[in-house]
Image: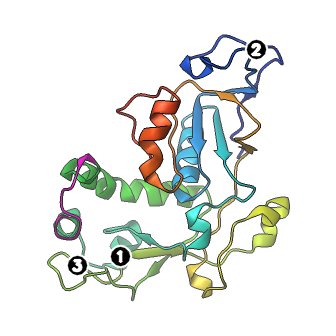
């Protein structure tokens, strides 16, 4: 799968507000959907956009790809996921929501009940979508929630992927961000669509910029810098 924007001519063109204050700026690509970050959030957003017919570009701020995910165990917390259902493991959106309300609470718009439900209700579609793209999911059936004794808590909601031969990444293997050696079943590696270095390339986007980078507390600064809508969600 390629997710690279359309190249534009070498001459500067009229663009959105991002170009203000940068006279003579040359756009390198014109795209529908720009993703900042190459961790699991960013790559998932890029895959989803591409599957929906959007001309997509991923940008990164370092010479390594993989984001925070590349330095993690690669596990996902996915209540009531399709693998649990297939194995006959009892769980529900209601139980997971009750657990999240106790452990997370409501400390702002990003922790609202609606957002929790949006996360929980889209888990089956997300897992199935990436399975269609070649991800081989397996259950971490003995891995507990952080607070499994709380009402709604469970053991076995975690998912990870089967060990992946990184040699299949070819040239991308050299720029993969990796962590210290970990048990095989905590590896999480995915193929990467086309990426560019944000320090040298200026893309012109049309639809949205999901910022999948860490830390998230820079979202307001980024929105202000690029004159983005204050209602956009990053992460």
Q: Please, which residue is most extreme toward the top here? A: 14
Q: Nearer the viewer, mark 2 or mark 1?
A: 2
Q: Which mark is residue 157?
A: 1
**Front residue (pair 208, 169):** 208
Query: Can residue 148 be seen in this snapshot?
Result: yes
Q: Which mark is residue 12?
A: 2
- Left or right? Give the position of 98 relative to 36: left
Q: Nearer the viewer, residue 22 or 62?
A: 22
Residue 81: horizontal and vertical position, in percent? 37, 67
Q: What is the total number of numbered labels drawn onto the structure image?
A: 3
| Element class at badge 2 | loop
Q: Callout 3: 10 Å neighbours few (<14), some, many (20+)?
A: many
The answer to which of 230 and 129 lies nearer the viewer is: 230
Vertical arrangement, residue 121 with respect to residue 146, above or below = above
Mark 3 or mark 2, which has the lower sequence index?
2
* Magenta region: 101-109
152 on left or right of 67: left
Name the residue at 46% across, 60% down.
Answer: 127
Point out residue 193 in the picture as x, y percentages from the top left corner: 70, 48
Counting from the top left corner in percent of width and height, residue 231 is at: 35, 33
At horizontal 85% and vertical 60% (from top left) the residue drawn is 171
Label 1 near label 2: C-beta < 8 Å?
A: no
Instruction: Kindly check if marks 1 and 3 are in contact, taking CB atoms under 8 A apart as contact.
Output: no
SS at circle 1 = loop
User: Is residue 96 covered in magenta?
Assistant: no
Q: Label 3: which residue?
A: 153
């Amino acid at each position: 799968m390629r997710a690279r924007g359309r190249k534009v001519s070498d001459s500067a063109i009229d663009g959105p507000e991002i170009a203000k204050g940068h006279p003579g700026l040359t756009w390198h690509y014109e795209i529908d959907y720009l993703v900042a970050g190459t961790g699991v959030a960013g790559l998932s957003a890029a895959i989803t956009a591409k599957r929906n017919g959007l001309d997509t570009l991923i940008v990164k701020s370092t010479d390594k790809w993989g984001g925070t995910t590349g330095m993690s165990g690669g596990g996902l917390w996915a209540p009531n996921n399709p693998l649990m259902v297939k194995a006959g493991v009892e769980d529900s959106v209601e139980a997971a929501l009750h657990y999240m309300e106790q452990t997370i609470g409501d400390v702002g718009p990003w922790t609202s009940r609606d957002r929790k439900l949006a996360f929980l209700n889209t888990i089956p579609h997300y897992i199935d979508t990436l399975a269609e793209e070649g991800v081989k999911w397996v259950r971490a059936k003995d891995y507990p929630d952080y607070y499994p004794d709380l009402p709604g808590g469970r053991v076995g909601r975690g998912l990870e992927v089967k060990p992946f031969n990184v040699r299949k990444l070819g040239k991308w293997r050299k720029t993969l961000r990796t962590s210290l050696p970990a048990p095989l079943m905590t590896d999480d590696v995915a193929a990467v669509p086309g990426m560019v270095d944000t320090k040298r390339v200026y893309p012109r986007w049309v639809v949205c910029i999901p910022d999948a980078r860490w830390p998230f507390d820079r979202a307001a600064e980024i929105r202000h810098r690029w004159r983005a809508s204050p209602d956009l969600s990053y992460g």
